[in-house]
Amino acid sequence: MKKVFRLENLDCANCAAKMERGIQKISGVTYASVSFMTQKLTIEAEDTTFDQVMDEVVRVCKKVEPDCIIKR
């Protein structure tokens, strides 16, 4: 399943790159892209575990950029 989410309060391109690398390491993620310019997260993961993957994505993002909000 592939989904695109809006991001709020993503402050810099470096943080976006760190978030993208962290998300790509999560088990079950087949593709991840974080765009600072468009403030969007594109993620592709297995359908059966997508909700658990997204919980982990939120955790990774909060570690890098505590103010960033993923609009689900």
Image (tube, grey):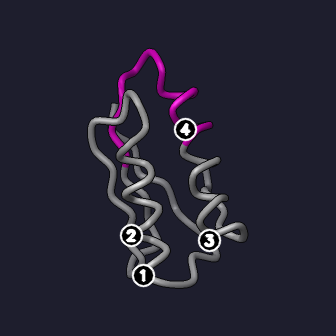
Q: Which residue is mark 2?
A: 17
In front: label 3 or label 1: 1
Residue that sits furthest to the top in the current view: 48
Mark 2 vs mark 1, CA separation in Å: 6 Å
Q: Quadrant of residue 26?
A: top left
Mark 2 vs mark 3, CA separation in Å: 15 Å
Q: Earlier in the sequence, mark 3 or mark 4?
A: 3
User: 38 left or right of 71?
Assistant: left
Mark 3 vs mark 1, CA separation in Å: 13 Å
Image location of residue 1, percent across then percent down: 34, 30
In front: label 2 or label 3: 2
Q: Does the CB distance between marks 2 and 3 fall below 8 Å?
A: no
**Above or below: residue 13 compared with residue 58:** below
Mark 3 vs mark 4, CA separation in Å: 16 Å
Asked if residue 14 lies in the magenta stretch, the reply is no
Label annotation for residue 54: 4
Q: Does the CB distance between marks 2 and 1 fall below 8 Å?
A: yes
Callout 2 amino acid: Ala
Label annotation for residue 8: 3
Q: Earlier in the sequence, mark 2 or mark 3?
A: 3
Q: Earlier in the sequence, mark 1 or mark 4?
A: 1
Q: Which residue is mark 1?
A: 13
Part of the protein shown in magenta: 43-56
Residue nearest the viewer, comparing 67 with 6: 67
Q: Quadrant of residue 2?
A: top left
Callout 4 amino acid: Met
SS of the residue under disc 4:
helix
